[in-house]
Amino acid sequence: MGLATYDDLKAAVADWLDREDLAGRTGDFITLAEARLNRLMGFSALTARAELEAAPGQAELAGPEDLRDVLALTRSDGTARGHRLQGGRIRLVPPPEAPERLVLDYRARPRLSEAAPTNAVLAEHPDLYLFGALAEAAPFLRDGEMLAVFAARLDAALTEARMREARLNAPAARRPDPALAPESRP
């Protein structure tokens, strides 16, 4: 079974639990796993950009629904804009004196649902979702052994995903182009 969509993930969680009576709870386990992953992850695949407009004197803007952390808030000319993030709202410090067009670079919260059946985390790291949901199911089932197994699997998958992210974000090694190297003469 593939894990490409929210429905695939719910079916896989139900299969791994092997409990038909929990079919209606798999969405809850996924939501709990997603909340945990949102606290633990900082993957570049979760970055997004939004354009915002602030009116003169407007001290606060609503952030995008999936806003987790602000990476940068800049004016349309590229200069930094003072701000603070408070409860999903962006406070402008100081409020603008004239209308401003702003560009918000932010880290998004991945959220799976029937309406949003896939995201970058599920596409790249389906094991994070699966093992996270199974680890969240274990306390509900009062199964300590299951919790230990799937918490360890989640930790291992998270470590591997972080290592992959570090490799992807590491600067590339510089390699000289042999065609540009001076000729060596004996």
Image (tube, rainbow, N blue to C red):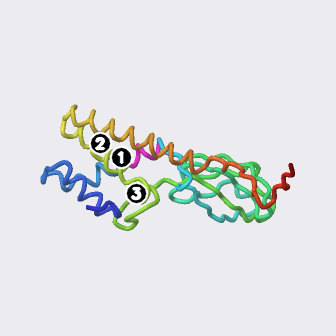
Residue drawn at the location 70% of the way across and 54% of the way down: 73
**Which label lies toward us, 3 or 2?**
3
Circle 1: residue type: Ala
- Label placed on residue 126: none
Q: Which residue is mark 1?
A: 33
Circle 3: residue type: Leu
Of all residues, the one furthest to the front in this rendering is 186
Q: Earlier in the sequence, mark 3 or mark 1?
A: 1
Q: Nearer the viewer, residue 172 or 109?
A: 172
Of all residues, the one furthest to the bottom in this rendering is 115
Q: Which residue is mark 3?
A: 122
108 vs 92, left or right, is: left
Q: What span is colored magenta in the figure?
A: 32-39
Q: Which residue is mark 2?
A: 136
Q: Name the secondary structure under disc 2.
A: helix
Residue 54, x across and y down, in percent: 71, 62
Q: Is residue 35 magenta?
A: yes
